[in-house]
Structures are given as C-alpha cells and as structure tokens.
Amino acid sequence: MQIETTSKKQLDVLNALYEGQVSSEKALQRLTPKHEFKGFKRARYIKIKMSIPNGSRKLNMFLKTLFAIPIPIGFGKIVVKLMNSKVQKGLMNTKSLEKVDPEKRQEVAEKMWRAENSLNDLDLNELYTYLRYAKNTTIDIDTEDAKIKIKIR
C-alpha cells in the first residue's frame, strides 16, 4: 500500500513548472499555504519586582509589599496621559533655574533642554500601544543601585 503525499493541485503546479508554463516564484506561491496573521495578544497586567541591594531590609520589604499585586495595564494609559501632559507643558521652568547656583546654571539649563527635546521626540501614544501588545515580555534592569524585573502578562 502506497501513501499518497502529493495532491492533485500540487502535481498540476509541478507539471506546469516542469513544462515552463509557470515561473518558479509563481509555483512557490501556489504551493505554499497562506497563513493569516491573527494579531498580537493583548497584555492585561504588569508585575514588578524591585529590590535595592544597598538599602535596608525594611525598604525592600516595603517595595515587595507595594508591588505584590499585579497592576492592571489600564493604569499604564493613565500614566502615559500624565507623562504626555507634562511633556507638552515643557520641563524647563525658569523659577527652578533661579534656585541653582549661578556658576552651574548654564550646565543645568543645557541638561534640562536635552531632556525636554528627547521626551518630545517620543510619541507616548505609541509607547502605550507597545505596552498594551507586549504580552509575555520580561524586562530586567540590573544596576548597582537597584534590581528591577518587570513582567508584562
């Protein structure tokens, strides 16, 4: 008993290719199955684990307690809207520059200007969309000051 592995359609395409009636690209397109893109899975929660190696034990316990419950992703939209309004208002504040030592004022103003321009280039609505559709993503931030692990589920 012989198992048939090719269908009638596949044989017709291969015969047409052999006879030169169809190009190899067209034959490949006809033979490969078409897959539908169903879209990305949406994230629902953000789980944060944070610890400070040089911090006190009480501080680490407080951070673990604060982030013990997963945060709904809807709060991310609220945070993004607040960030967007702060960026649109502008970060540079002349009153805060008056409090800075006159010798360092120029340096601080340049740093504030760079920060403001880098945030203006960031489209915060896109940031929320990326966050919303980043299911099963893990972000590890490991520095000398803190260790942060963010899981988007």
Image (cartoon, grey):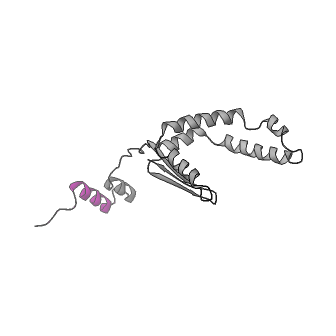
Q: Nearer the viewer, residue 128 or 36?
A: 128
Residue lying furthest right: 103
**Percent position of residue 14, x then y:** 28, 60
* Residue 118 seen: yes
Residue lying furthest bottom: 1
Q: Residue sitting at 57 percent across and 37 percent down? A: 79
Q: Which range of residues does the magenta coloring cover?
A: 2-20
Q: Nearer the viewer, residue 62 or 87?
A: 62
**Percent position of residue 119, x then y:** 67, 42
Instruction: State the image quarter where residue 87 is shown.
Output: top right
Instruction: State the image quarter where residue 25 is shown.
Output: bottom left
Q: Residue sitting at 58 percent across and 37 percent down? A: 80
Q: Nearer the viewer, residue 125 or 99?
A: 99
* Residue 22 seen: no
- Magenta-drawn stretch contains 11: yes
Residue lying furthest left: 1
**Percent position of residue 132, x then y:** 48, 42
Left or right: residue 113 versus residue 9 is right
Left or right: residue 91 versus residue 95 is left
Assign the magenta stretch its main secondary structure: helix
Q: Residue sitting at 29 percent across and 56 percent down? A: 13
Q: Is residue 5 above or below residue 62?
A: below
